Image (spheres, rainbow, N blue to C red):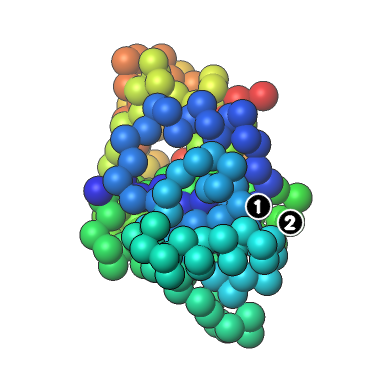
Amino acid sequence: MHVLIVTGGKFDYTFSKQYIKTLSIDKVFAVDRGLEYVDQLNLQPEWIIGDFDTVNQTILKKYEEMIENHKLAAVIDRHPARKDASDTELAVEKAVKCGATHITILAGTGSRLDHVFANLNVLWLAEKESILCQLVDSNNRIQLLSSQGRQNCKISKETQWGKYVSFIAMSEQVKGFTLEGMAYPLDDAIISQGSSLTVSNEIEDEYGKITVKEGNVWIIESRD
């Protein structure tokens, strides 16, 4: 089951509209201000999640009335503003509990780097359950790979997000790190946190294959 989470970061309507057409989506989660974006994209959310401190209250009321009048089968999951988790974290947790096998997060990046890094860390909530979770914007597609989760993955050269693929150690060390089908292959290597060794690699074969035996690594496909 593929869950699309639209949260409240920087929103590119044209990109989002086109990208969604390439996805097979089963459920849509709108997160706080992301409800405005879901409305613009003419999507029907099944869950509306957040403390709703940034969403346009007129838009929120519109959806509350639609639900009340049985014009929309959705659930509003309201949380207090003072809480121990971000709205996006709550949405990813909900998607995992709902049985997601693939999660895509849109509007999860932007100028607030604290929010961006928090959302990068939220990828762990899905990865530890061996669920592919991708944070996507017009320039980047990011996932986390872990020895405690999926352990390996591959990226198609035909459908990769731009030209470059970088690998950033999230844990102190990433051991048994193997790259196949890449311009700069590695075999059972150790990547240390803080190292830039694995930045700006390129896929040369039909697929780039990545394996991790111990640790966590962000995989960032990038285009200018």
Q: Residue furthest right?
A: 111
Label whose residue precedes the other's in the sequence (2 or 1): 1
Where is residue 221 drawn, in percent x and y? 51, 32
Give the quadrant of the C terminus: top right
In the rendered image, residue 169, in percent from the top left (x then y), is placed at 51, 51
Q: Nearer the viewer, mark 2 or mark 1?
A: 1
Q: Is residue 119 visible?
A: no
Residue beneath disc 2: 112
Query: Mark 2 to mark 1: distance in Å?
Result: 8 Å
Residue at point 65% right, 43% down? 11
Are circles 2 and 1 on residues that touch, CB within 8 Å?
Answer: yes
In the displayed structure, does residue 135 sit left or right of residue 71? Answer: right
Q: Give the amino acid type for the residue marked by disc 2 in the picture.
A: Arg
Q: Position of residue 62 (x, y in %)?
A: 56, 60
The image's mark for residue 9 is: 1
Foreground residue, 32 or 185?
32
How many C-alpha atoms fall within 10 Å of the one at disc 2: few (<14), some, or many (≥20)?
Answer: few
Circle 2 — which element?
loop
Q: Residue at point 62% right, 58% down?
A: 59
- Where residue 223 appears, as percent x and y from the top left, is 60, 25
